[in-house]
Image: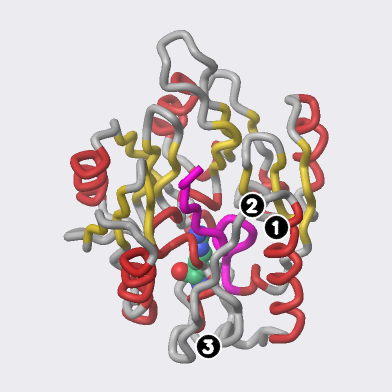
Amino acid sequence: MCPPTHFRVSYSINPWMNPDKPVDPALAYAQWEDLRDRYRALGHRVEELTPVPELPDMVFAANGATVVDGRVLGARFAFTERHGEAAVHARWYRDHGFTDVRVPQHVNEGEGDFAVTASWVLAGRGFRSSPLSHAEAQEYFARPVIGLDLVDPRYYHLDTALCVLDGGSREPGGPAAEIMYYPGAFSAGSRAVLARLFPEALIADAADAAAFGLNAVSDGRHVLLPQAAVGLFEPLRERGYEPVGMDVAELMKGGGSVKCVTGELRVG
Ligand code: ARG
């Protein structure tokens, strides 16, 4: 995670960002700290990146890299405003014992568009990550990459419309991965792909998607999500998860919430 010390909305690169609606920096910081402390209270280790003053979107740490089986695929941002973030993330991984860190050839915005299950990498395209990055990720991670077409500009990253609740098992016959998603964010073909791969998925409605309810982080048991996504809490409980509602309203002014500010290291 990266503290929102310099977080502000001074440009607009997604429909949620309105430079005329200023961020309350103290409130954003408090909401971010609350989330960080909640992860720690649940037993997770949280590392902090040092924020850079010229990079106001750095708080959205999920976009900086993707880690699968200890291999790190760095990011290459679509917009110049965020270009500088990629090197900061790559350096962090190199300085913390990750030996396989790839500087990507094609545009990919890290876990914004890559979601990892035990068997696959689900990959978004249409607004940010290049379709060419999907082939690059498949070759590098040696995992099948399933390309999904995003069609609604409000859901410009895969992680705004889909969340892996449980990665499932890689063993044949083992438990399947469980996801939740908002079908309206995807093309008809991609919706059919998701229905085929995840027939039991939790389907979110438009209101919970607009509350950034899919922009959640699950450890397989607890699901941290914006508290405003009220319709998801009961269905999550019915499936055996413990939803943990967070107030991240100030961070949403940048077009992201719980998942966007959380890069997953997946080191067990
Ligand atoms: N302002 C950032 C951008 O538009 C928000 C990124 C949100 N991150 C995410 N993982 N969806 O790039």
Whether tag 1 and tag 3 are in contact, CB under 8 A, the answer is no
**Viewer-nearest residue: 69 or 62:** 69
Name the side, left or right, on which 206 lies relative to 154.
Answer: right
Q: Mark 1 to mark 2: distance in Å? A: 5 Å
Residue beneath label 2, please?
A: 44
Q: Position of residue 68 (x, y in %)?
A: 36, 44
Magenta stretch: includes residue 34:
no
Tell me, yes or no, if residue 149 can be seen here.
yes
Looking at the picture, how far across and down is residue 235, in whole percent?
77, 31
From the image, state whether disc 3 or disc 2 is nearer to you.
Answer: 2
What's the residue type where badge 3 is placed?
Answer: Ser
Residue type marked 1: Arg
Please name the residue shown 55% across and 52% down the image: 160
- Residue drawn where x is 29% and y is 55% of the image: 73
Q: Magenta stretch mostly in which secondary structure?
A: loop
Where residue 176 sits: x, y (%)? 52, 19
Using the image, determine if residue 50 lies above or below residue 116. Answer: below
> Residue 96 sits in which quadrant?
bottom left
The magenta segment:
254-268
Residue 262, x across and y down, in percent = 56, 59
Label located before the other in sequence (1 or 3)? 3
Any mark on residue 10, and which? Answer: 3
Element at badge 3?
loop
